[in-house]
């Protein structure tokens, strides 16, 4: 029969990834979410001011079980025009009925690292490309969406930058109209999200954050 220390040592080799998984908080003060809606000869730009979220990743095995969730307060979206923003929140987003915009990942597919495979560890300061599949819950409607991102892991923090596009009507939102101006049925979102452990030390081991197949 194996001794207790021997069993502990064997378990350490069997489940190393659990101990290495880190949970990082998205830091709004260091992050940006901006959106653009267009029509011929007209561009409306805005941004989200209040949002939060978490990222769960094992830097040594980033392709296994990586997960992220982002929550945006719909009432915090602004375009710089008070009249237009009031109409956007009341008539289009209906923020009293649907106060949160939620995105959660379903799958994270990393590109291969230089001279290594797609499952290679995240090297400090090295940029990696990834394709994200996730679910966007907006205006009471959930839709799956896919888009590319650029990821960099640096001194315990994770930075993700990318762009995605979707249609208003996919989420039962009326195409925005302001006075004589009718916008396109499309919105482009650009983001730069920085996630880190607010307490330092490179992230909190483990997490109560739901996994890729949870919370659906």
Image (cartoon, rainbow, N blue to C red):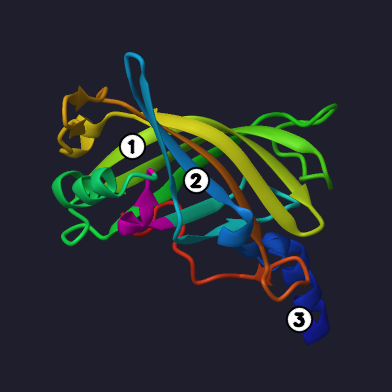
Measured in 3D between alpha carbons, the distance from the residue under mark 2 to the one under mark 3, in whole angstroms, is 57 Å
Measured in 3D between alpha carbons, the distance from the residue under mark 3 to the one under mark 1, in whole angstroms, is 51 Å
Q: Is residue 149 magenta?
A: no
Is residue 83 found left or right of 149 in the rendered image?
left
Q: Give the label, 2 or 1, closer to the camera.
A: 2
Residue 174 in the image: above or below residue 215: above
Secondary element at image label 2:
strand
Is residue 85 found left or right of 31 in the rendered image?
left
Q: Give the label, 2 or 3, closer to the camera.
A: 2
Measured in 3D between alpha carbons, the distance from the residue under mark 2 to the one under mark 1, in whole angstroms, is 19 Å
**Percent coordinates x, y for residue 78 in the rendering:** 37, 49
Please provide the residue range marked out in magenta. 71-79
Binning the other alpha carbons within 10 Å of mark 2 as few (below 14), some (14 to 19) or many (20 upward) gives: many
Is residue 33 found left or right of 76 in the rendered image?
right
Give the residue number, with chain letter if any, for mark 3: 1
Binning the other alpha carbons within 10 Å of mark 3 as few (below 14), some (14 to 19) or many (20 upward) gives: few
Secondary element at image label 3:
loop
Give the residue number, with chain letter if any, for mark 1: 144
**Percent coordinates x, y for residue 167 in the rendering:** 28, 29
Give the residue number, with chain letter if any, for mark 2: 33
From this viewpoint, is residue 65 visible?
no
Residue 161 or residue 6, whichever sits in front: 161
Q: Residue at x 70, y 49 (%)?
A: 61
Q: Tag on residue 20?
A: none
Name the N-terminal-most of marks 2 and 1: 2
Q: Residue at x 33, y 44 (%)?
A: 81
Secondary element at image label 1:
strand
Q: Residue at x 76, y 39 (%)?
A: 120
Name the N-terminal-most of marks 3 and 1: 3
Name the N-terminal-most of marks 2 and 3: 3
Q: Do the residues bearing badges 2 and 3 touch, measured as CB atoms within 8 Å?
A: no
């Amino acid at each position: 029969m194996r001794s207790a220390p021997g069993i502990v040592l064997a378990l350490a080799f069997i489940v190393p990834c659990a101990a290495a998984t880190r949970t990082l908080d998205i830091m709004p003060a260091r992050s940006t979410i901006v959106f653009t809606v267009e029509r011929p000869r007209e561009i409306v730009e805005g941004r989200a001011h209040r949002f939060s979220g978490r990222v769960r990743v094992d830097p040594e095995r980033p392709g296994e079980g990586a997960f992220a969730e982002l929550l945006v307060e719909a009432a915090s979206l602004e375009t710089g025009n008070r009249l237009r923003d009031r109409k956007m929140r009341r008539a289009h987003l209906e923020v009293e009925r649907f106060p949160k915009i939620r995105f959660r990942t379903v799958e994270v597919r990393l590109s291969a690292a230089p001279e290594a495979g797609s499952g290679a560890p995240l090297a400090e300061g090295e940029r990696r490309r990834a394709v994200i599949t996730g679910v966007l819950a907006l205006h009471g409607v959930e839709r799956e969406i896919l888009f590319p991102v650029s990821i960099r892991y640096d001194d315990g923090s994770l930075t993700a930058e990318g762009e995605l596009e979707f249609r208003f009507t996919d989420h039962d939102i009326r195409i925005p109209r302001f006075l004589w101006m009718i916008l396109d049925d499309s919105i482009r979102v650009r983001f730069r999200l920085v996630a880190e452990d607010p307490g330092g030390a490179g992230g909190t081991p483990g997490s109560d954050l739901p996994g890729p197949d949870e919370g659906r």
